[in-house]
Image (spheres, rainbow, N blue to C red):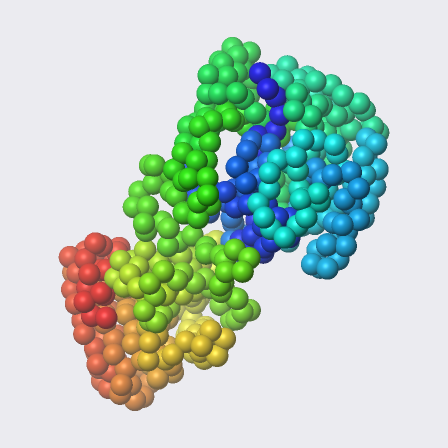
C-alpha cells in the first residue's frame, strides 16, 4: 500500500477568519463544503491543492462561537505544511504583512521551521522540506513559494512506544530518526508523524483551536475494510467504519488515545462537482432530514474578494443567513428555551424564502439551558429581569439599524415560546421598537400591564389549540389590542410545540 497522511481535521470557532487564513493567507483552495456527517448542523470545510489530492487536505469542523479547547495528551498538537527550501524568508515577511502571529523559527530534524498561529491558536508549522509539490490554485503566491503539501503532524502520547508500534504495524509508517522526546515515523510518501512523549502532560480538551483527528491513507475501500477486520481480530479499541461519500473511513483510537482515521484515496471530491467547480456548492450528507432546512442553520462566509457580513460586537450574540435572492426583508429570531440563534431559521426560511434571517441568542441560562430572562419557578417570572432584557432588546434593534443599515419598515421580529414571551413584553414596555412582530405560542409574563400607545404596530399571534398556555397567550393578545396594536390571532392544530402549520400561517400574514 501507499502510506501517508490523507487529511487532518481540526475545529474552528470563526468560519470567516478560518477561510481568510487558509485560503487568503496560505493560498489553499476550498475544495468542499458540507454539513457534518455526525451532526448536520455543523459546517465542515475542506481545503487542499487544486485537485483536492490526498496529502494536501486540511479540514475544519465549524463550532461557530464555540468554546476554546486545549491541546494535550491524546491529541494532535501541531500541523506542519511543506514549503520549498529557501522559502522561510518569504513566509515570514508575508506573515508580518498579514498580521499573522509568529512564534519564531527553529531547526527540527535538520529542517528549518517557521511556527505560526492560525486565528483559533492552532500551531501551523511551515517546514522547508524537499517533498514533491502538488499544484496549488492561483492565489497570487509565487509558485516557487507556494505550500507544497502536508509535511506532518505531532501526536502527544503518554505511551510513546505503544503508539509507535501501533501506527507502524497497521498504517504503513516506518520508524525514523529520534530527536529529543520525539520519535519520527515516515510514510512511503515522505510525510511524517512525530510522536512526542507526553508522559505527565495535561489531558487534551476538545474545543476550537484543537485537532479532532488525523486521517492516514489507504489505497481503496478494500484496504480500509481489511484493516478494520485485522483490528477487530486483535481486539483493539472500538472501531467504526463509515462511507463518507468521498472516501471510505475507519476510526480507531491508538494506545495513546489520539483519534486516528484511515481514509481511502477514492472516489474523491469530484464525485459530485467538476474539478473547476470544487468547493462552490454546499452539500448535505445523504441521510440528512430536511437538508434545505439544515442549510440555513449553517454559518455563511465569503471567500477572499467576495462580499461577506462584517459582524459587530453587539448586545446579543447573533448570526445572519442571507439567501441568494434576498428581497430586503430581515426577520429577527428569538428562540425558545434551550435553543440558540439558529433554531428558528428553518421555520422563517419556509415562511419567507427571500428574507434575510437574523438569529439572536438569549443571555440568560437556567440549569444549563439558554433563555431570555430568569424565572423563579413555573410561571413565576423575574419582573426586574424581564424589564432589563426588554430594554436590552430595544437597544439591540437600535444598534442593528446603524450597524447593519436595516430599515425599520422592512424588519420583522419573530419569537417562539420564551423568545415570544420577551418579545411580547418588550412590545408593551418599549412601543415602536419594531413595527411588525410574530409571536408563536406566547404567554403574558408581565405582572402589571403598562398603558402605552402601540398604534402602527402589527402583531400575529399563533396559539396551539391544545396548548395548556393558550389562555395566557390570549391574555397577551388582549393587552396588545387594548394598547392600540393591530393583532391577528390564529389557532394552530397543535400544542405548545411548533407544527407544520406555523410556517404557512406566518408566510400568509407577511
Give left or right: position of 75 versus 347: right
- Residue 460, compared with residue 284, is above or below; it is below
Furthest residue in direction top, as rendered: 233
- Res 192 visible: yes
Q: Position of residue 396 (x, y in %)?
A: 46, 75
Residue 122 picture location, percent across and down? 66, 46
Q: Residue at x 40, y 34 (%)?
A: 271
Residue 420 horizontal side relative to residue 234, left or right = left
Query: Horizontal and vertical percent for residue 279?
Result: 46, 45
Relative to the observer, which residue lies in front, 126 or 255? 126
Name the residue located 38 percent from the left edge and 42 percent from the top edge: 284
| Placement of 235 over or under 396, stated as above or below | above
From what the image shows, is residue 210 above or below residue 313? above
| Residue 167 drawn at (x, y percent) | 64, 20
Q: In percent of the image, x 34 and y 71: which residue is there?
A: 328
Task: State which quarter of the image contains the C terminus.
Answer: bottom left
Q: Quadrant of residue 253?
A: top right
Do we see residue 366 in this rendering?
Answer: no
Count of marks, rendered view: 0
Q: In the figure, 218 relative to 270: above or below?
A: above
Question: Which one is in front, 314 or 431?
Answer: 314
Q: Quadrant of the N terminus?
A: top right
Q: Name which residue lies at 42% across and 71% down.
A: 382
Amino acid at each position: 500500500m501507499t502510506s501517508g497522511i490523507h487529511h487532518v481535521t481540526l475545529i474552528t470557532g470563526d468560519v470567516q477568519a478560518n477561510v481568510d487564513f487558509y485560503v487568503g493567507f496560505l493560498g489553499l483552495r476550498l475544495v468542499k463544503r458540507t454539513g457534518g456527517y455526525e451532526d448536520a448542523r455543523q459546517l465542515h470545510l475542506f481545503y487542499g491543492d487544486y485537485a483536492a489530492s490526498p496529502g494536501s487536505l486540511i479540514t475544519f469542523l465549524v463550532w461557530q462561537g464555540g468554546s476554546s479547547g486545549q491541546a494535550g495528551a491524546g491529541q494532535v498538537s501541531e500541523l506542519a505544511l511543506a514549503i520549498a527550501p529557501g522559502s522561510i524568508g518569504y513566509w515570514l515577511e508575508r506573515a508580518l504583512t498579514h498580521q499573522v502571529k509568529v512564534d519564531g523559527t527553529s531547526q527540527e530534524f535538520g529542517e528549518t521551521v517557521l511556527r505560526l498561529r492560525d486565528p483559533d491558536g492552532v500551531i501551523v508549522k511551515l517546514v522547508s522540506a524537499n517533498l514533491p509539490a502538488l499544484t496549488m490554485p492561483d492565489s497570487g503566491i509565487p509558485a516557487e513559494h507556494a505550500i507544497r503539501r502536508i509535511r506532518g503532524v505531532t501526536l502527544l502520547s503518554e505511551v510513546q512506544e505503544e503508539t509507535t508500534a501501533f501506527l507502524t504495524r497497521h498504517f504503513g509508517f516506518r520508524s525514523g530518526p529520534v530527536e529529543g522526546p520525539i520519535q519520527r515515523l515516515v510514510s512511503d510518501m515522505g510525510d511524517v508523524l512525530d510522536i512526542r512523549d507526553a508522559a505527565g502532560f495535561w489531558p487534551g480538551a476538545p474545543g476550537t483551536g484543537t485537532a479532532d483527528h488525523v486521517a492516514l491513507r489507504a489505497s481503496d475501500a478494500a484496504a480500509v475494510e481489511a484493516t478494520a477486520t485485522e483490528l477487530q481480530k486483535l481486539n483493539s479499541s472500538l472501531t467504526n467504519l463509515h462511507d463518507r461519500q468521498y472516501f471510505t473511513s475507519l476510526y480507531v483510537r491508538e494506545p495513546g488515545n489520539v483519534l486516528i482515521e484511515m481514509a481511502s484515496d477514492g472516489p474523491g471530491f469530484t464525485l459530485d462537482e467538476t474539478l473547476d467547480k470544487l468547493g462552490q456548492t454546499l452539500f448535505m450528507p445523504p441521510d440528512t432530514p430536511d437538508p434545505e432546512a439544515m442549510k440555513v442553520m449553517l454559518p455563511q462566509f465569503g471567500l477572499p474578494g467576495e462580499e461577506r457580513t462584517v459582524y459587530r460586537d453587539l448586545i446579543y450574540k447573533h448570526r445572519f443567513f442571507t439567501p441568494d435572492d434576498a428581497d430586503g426583508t430581515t426577520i429577527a429570531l428569538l428562540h425558545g428555551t434551550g435553543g440558540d440563534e439558529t433554531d428558528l431559521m428553518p421555520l422563517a426560511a419556509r415562511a419567507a424564502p427571500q428574507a434575510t434571517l437574523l438569529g439572536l441568542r438569549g443571555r440568560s441560562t437556567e440549569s444549563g439551558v439558554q433563555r431570555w430572562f430568569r424565572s423563579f419557578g413555573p410561571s413565576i417570572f423575574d419582573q426586574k429581569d424581564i424589564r432589563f432584557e426588554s430594554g436590552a432588546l430595544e437597544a439591540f434593534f437600535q444598534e442593528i439599524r446603524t450597524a447593519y443599515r436595516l430599515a425599520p419598515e422592512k424588519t420583522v421580529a419573530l419569537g417562539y415560546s420564551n423568545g415570544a414571551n420577551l418579545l411580547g413584553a418588550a412590545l408593551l414596555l418599549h412601543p415602536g421598537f419594531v413595527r411588525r412582530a410574530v409571536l408563536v405560542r406566547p404567554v403574558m409574563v408581565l405582572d402589571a400591564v403598562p398603558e402605552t400607545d402601540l398604534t402602527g404596530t402589527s402583531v400575529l399571534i399563533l396559539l396551539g389549540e391544545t396548548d395548556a398556555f393558550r389562555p395566557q397567550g390570549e391574555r397577551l393578545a388582549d393587552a396588545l389590542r387594548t394598547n392600540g396594536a393591530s393583532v391577528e390571532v390564529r389557532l394552530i392544530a397543535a400544542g405548545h410545540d411548533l407544527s407544520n402549520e406555523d410556517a404557512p400561517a406566518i408566510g400568509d400574514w407577511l
